[in-house]
Image: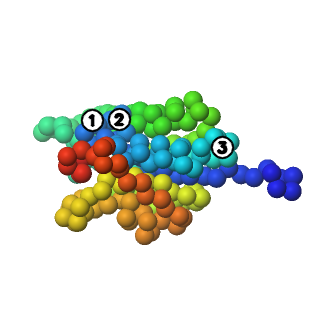
Amino acid sequence: MEGGVESEPTRIMVGVSQSTIKGYPHPSISSKGAFEWTLKKIIRSNTSGFKLLFLHVHVPDEDGFDDMDSIYASPEDFKRMKRMDKIRGLHLLEYFVNICHEIGVSCEAWIKVGDPKEEICHEVKRVQPDLLVVGSRGLGPFQKVFVGTVSEFCAKHAECPVVTIKRSIDEAPQDPVDD
């Protein structure tokens, strides 16, 4: 408290994604690592001094069917698919929100749809967090060309400081693209 005025908590946005190995509702290794690092190294025991802002960007399948084999789809089918995507994303966010609730850290969580790089930077501009924390899969130069890296893009384009958390070697699957 400075001069009798209570200060606002430091707002940290954490970009989270689902596991490419286990799928929803499991968090990716990188997301979980970024979250745990934030708790351990920034928040520590000062749970009232911070507010975590969890953003999950759902990437729709290119054809819109998410592994569904179908020749005909009714409008109800598309509505059902959109509801399922939202439900899966909510279950992912629930993982992080529940932990915050258990340890007493204030938080918010929401879902956007689109390209994670673009959506995270857009949300940083809109929400204006004090810090963005994202995980990194540790892709090699060849994989970066084809997969791209959200963390590098955010470090260059986000309108706030960005901390990129690398996976530990013992957590990395055989193929770094898997997360």
Tell me where residue 61 appears, x and y as whole percent: 25, 47
Image disc number at residue 168: none
Q: Quadrant of the C terminus?
A: top left
Q: Name the amino acid type tagged 1.
A: Lys
Tell me where residue 27 appears, x and y as whole percent: 37, 39
Q: Seen in the image, is 68 located left or right of residue 27?
A: left
Tell me where residue 115 appears, x and y as whole percent: 34, 57
Give the crowd class for mark 1: few <14, some 14-19, many >=20 residues within 10 Å: few
Q: Name the amino acid type tagged 2.
A: His
Q: Name the amino acid type tagged 3.
A: Asn
Residue placed most toward the observer, 160 or 37: 37
Where disc 3 sits, the SS reads loop
- Residue located beneath label 3 in the image: 46
Q: Please tell me whether mark 1 or mark 3 is closer to you in this view.
A: 3
Residue at left offset 30%, top offset 48% = 169
Q: Is residue 21 above or below residue 116?
A: above
- Residue located beneath label 2 in the image: 26
Residue placed most toward the observer, 60 or 77: 60
Residue at left offset 24%, top offset 44% = 173
Q: Outermost residue, front direction?
A: 170
Tell me where residue 99 appears, x and y as whole percent: 52, 33
Q: Which label's residue is closer to the chain start, 2 or 3?
A: 2
Q: Seen in the image, is 47 located left or right of residue 146?
A: right
Residue at left offset 59%, top offset 58% = 130
Q: Are marks 1 and 2 in contact (CB under 8 Å)?
A: yes
Where disc 1 sits, the SS reads loop
